[in-house]
Image (cartoon, grey):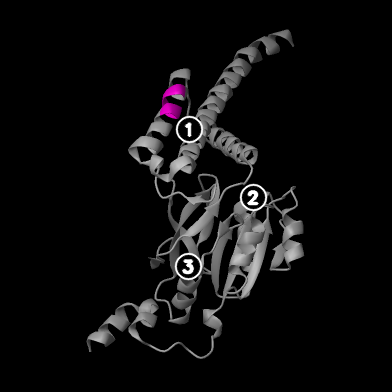
Amino acid sequence: ESRNRETSVHNEARQFLGEPRPSENNGSQLFTVLISSYNHAATIAACLESVRDIADEVLIVDFGSTDGTLDVARNLGIGRIVECSTPDACRALESARQQAVHPWILQLSADERLNPELGRQVQHTLIFNPTQHAYKIGITPCLQGTHLRFGGFQRTDSVRLYRRELGAYELVNGTPELQLPGGQVGALRSRLAKHTAQHPATEIGERISSATEQAERAFRQGKRSSQAKKAWRSSQRFLETYLFRSGWRDGWAGLHACLLAALETYTRENTLLHLEQASAENVSLNPESRRAA
């Protein structure tokens, strides 16, 4: 009786309670891997290889890569490329998931990898009749071959495995994520590994680009900066990640990650300050322009 009660409460964990695995998958247990990419030529091959043996379908949604990302994907022959007809990432992903043929979707970015343990958890969750509508999966960044376990760089869990018909995509810190209005959401224990660019210049360029986008969004929301805030916030970011959150425990990779985080913060604040100054100059020039006209 005790075993039956455990089984009824945790259906998705029944493989650990001795219930035999079904001899064949049924349609409700199949899933599509949806991979979003933009200039991920250096990482998309490893991403595709990590899902090759477990995915029932692979869809690649590319947002206009110019570095040969799609050539790498085509040469591997893993998955189908979905052409984007809109610059809106949320709408593009929504269109892609409507083209998925299976009832469950596992969403990844092309710089992420599925480790074998997480792959088994995904399969077991679906095989043993999941009781949840969606599952959150955390992310551990990997820099210079080191998985960053300190410094606060591990991302909080986000919905990555979900029923195809549920939720809607929204931008969260510039990244499209599925938002569920309610319902049952579980979590998988293992985490995705997010690999950064191999070349330092590429990684720095990506950080600057991300910081610039963050500043533009913040400016449109009415946020402002100053020289004092720029200096303080970038210094605070380094101290927080390296000392207070023990980033030093990840060695040289941890130091590198903390410096990059500080650089990203400095760039965001500096860009925000520049946008504010440019807007003020434009406002002050407009009356003169009208008088001259």
Q: Is residue 221 shown to the viewer in this render?
A: no
What is the x, y in percent for residue 289? 70, 12
As displayed, is residue 88 above or below residue 127?
above
Q: Quadrant of the N terminus?
A: bottom left
For residue 261: magenta? no
Residue range (magenta): 231-235
Q: What residue type is labelled 2?
A: Asp
**Cα gap from disc 2 to disc 3, whole angstroms:** 30 Å
Instruction: Please say whether residue 70 is visible from this viewpoint.
Output: yes
Q: Is mark 1 on a helix, strand or loop?
A: helix
Q: Mark 2 points at which residue?
A: 88
Q: Where is residue 21 in the image (x, y as percent from the top left)?
A: 45, 87
Which image quarter: residue 242? top left
Main SS of the magenta part reads helix
Q: Nearer the viewer, mark 2 or mark 3?
A: 3
Closer to the camera in the image, 178 or 32 = 32
**How many residues crowd around disc 1 within 10 Å: few (fewer than 14), some, or many (20 or more)?**
many
- Foreground tag (2 vs 1): 1
Mark 3 residue crowding within 10 angstroms, few (<14) / some (14–19) / many (20+): some
The amino acid beneath tag 3 is: Leu
Q: State how far apart marks 1 and 3 are (Cα).
A: 31 Å
For the residue pair 86 and 79, the one nearer the viewer reads as 79
Residue 263 placed where, x, y %? 52, 31
Residue 233 in the magenta stretch? The answer is yes
| Residue with the mark numbered 3 | 118
